[in-house]
Image (spheres, helix red, strand yellow):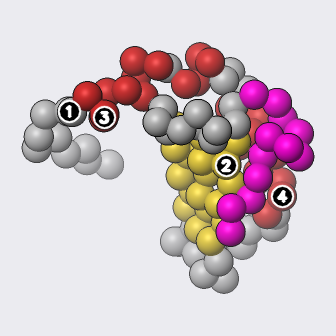
Amino acid sequence: MEHVTPDKFAKDYDRKVFVNLPWKESPQWMQFLNMAYVRIKPIQPAIRTSYYLIARAYSKDAPWKLEFEDGFTGKDYSYEWNGKGLDENSIKQTD
């Protein structure tokens, strides 16, 4: 895979995620990923199936967002996590 060099300088907004290090404040982020994945199983293997885990330093209520795109069915699934507990109240589907 080829990574392209950024064509512009990072703004303060772009740097905020790395300054706050949300993965250190929320070390259970991998459990969040697993729990969200279990909720949408099974996902059929397909070329266009993908997911994106986003750390959003600008959001205090839901600093983590996960988006799944099922390439077989065309369905999208989004989940937000408050970065704290790992229960029904802390992980919400946003679709």
What amino acid is labelled 2 in the image?
Answer: Glu
19 above or below 65? Answer: above
Query: Label 3 near label 4: C-beta < 8 Å?
Result: no
Disc 4: which residue: 39
Real-space CA distance between mark 3 and mark 2, rounded to the nearest whole angstrom = 20 Å
Real-space CA distance between mark 4 and mark 3, rounded to the nearest whole angstrom = 31 Å
Which badge, 4 or 3, comes first in the chain's sequence?
3
Q: Quadrant of residue 46?
A: bottom right
Disc 1: which residue: 10
Residue 74 on image: x %, y %: 60, 81
Q: Quadrant of the C terminus?
A: bottom right
Mark 1, residues whose alpha carbon is within 10 Å: few (<14), some, or many (≥20)? few
Start-end of magenta stretch: 84-95
Residue name at image x 52 percent, y 71 percent = 48
What amino acid is labelled 1 in the image?
Answer: Ala
Query: Label 3 near label 1: C-beta < 8 Å?
Result: yes
The mark lying in front, picked from 4 and 3, is: 3
Horizontal side of 54 relative to 72 (left or right) equals: left
- The label on residue 80 is 2
What amino acid is labelled 4 in the image?
Answer: Arg
Q: SS at mark 4?
A: helix
Real-space CA distance between mark 1 and mark 3, rounded to the nearest whole angstrom = 6 Å
| Residue placed most toward the observer, 53 or 22 | 22
Residue 17 on image: x %, y %: 42, 28
Disc 3: which residue: 14
The mark lying in front, picked from 4 and 2, is: 2
Q: SS at mark 1?
A: loop
